[in-house]
Amino acid sequence: MAMSEANAKPIVKFKTKAEHYVADACIVWCSDDRFYKLLKKFGKKQKFKNLDLVKIAGGAKALATPIDEPSAERDFVLNQLMTAVRLHGAKRIILMLHRDCGAYGGSENFINEYEEHTKLLGDLRIAREFVKKEMPALLVDAYLADFNGLYLAE
Ligand SMILES: [Zn+2]
C-alpha cells in the first residue's frame, strides 16, 4: 500500500500475519474490560488459535430480544456473526453475558444474586435458541461470567 510521507514511519512497528485463517469460534462478548482477561484465559484453555470477536456492550443481550419485537441491535449482532462465519468459517458460536453488566443496569438493578443469575441464564437460553435457529449448522454455546469464573449455561 502506498503511504504518504507523514505515514511512512509506523507509530507501532508490528508484523501482522497476512495469511487468512479458519476461526476456532466466533464469540459475542461484553466490552466490559473487567472480563477481558477471563476471555483470554478461556481462549487459552480451549486452545483457540484464531477467534472472531464481536465485543459489544451487553455481550449476547441483544440476541435475547423477544423474536416478535423488531430490534436493529439484534439484526446488527446477527449480521456480525453471519459475516464472520462466512469469511472465516467458524463452526462454533460462543455467547456470553456477565454479572454486574451495565447493559442490565448492573447488579444493583436486581433484588439479589439469584434473581440476576436467573435473568442472565434465561437471556442466554433465548439468545442461544435464536442463534441456533438462524444458523442451524453451527454449535452454539452460552456462558455466564461472574467475578469467580466462567460457567456453561445449560
Ligand atoms: Zn457488560
Image (tube, helix red, strand yellow):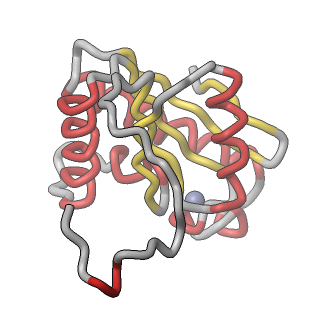
Quadrant holding the N terminus: bottom left
What x and y, as percent, mark residue 25? Answer: 43, 26
- Residue 139: name its quadrant: top left
Q: Is residue 49 left or right of residue 72?
A: right
Q: Quadrant of the C terminus?
A: top right
Which residue is drawn at the image coordinates 44% and 22% (left, top)?
A: 24
Residue 48 x, y percent position in the rendering? 56, 24
Q: Nearer the viewer, residue 133 or 78?
A: 78
State whether residue 116 is above or below residue 4: above
Report the image quarter containing ligand 1: bottom right
Q: In the drawing, does residue 74 fall left or right of residue 150?
A: left
Q: Residue furthest bottom?
A: 6
Q: Position of residue 10 (x, y in %)?
A: 45, 72
In percent of the image, x 18 and y 30: which residue is there?
A: 86
Query: Which quadrant of the figure has residue 52?
Result: top left
Q: Residue furthest right?
A: 148
Q: Residue at x 74, y 45 (%)?
A: 146
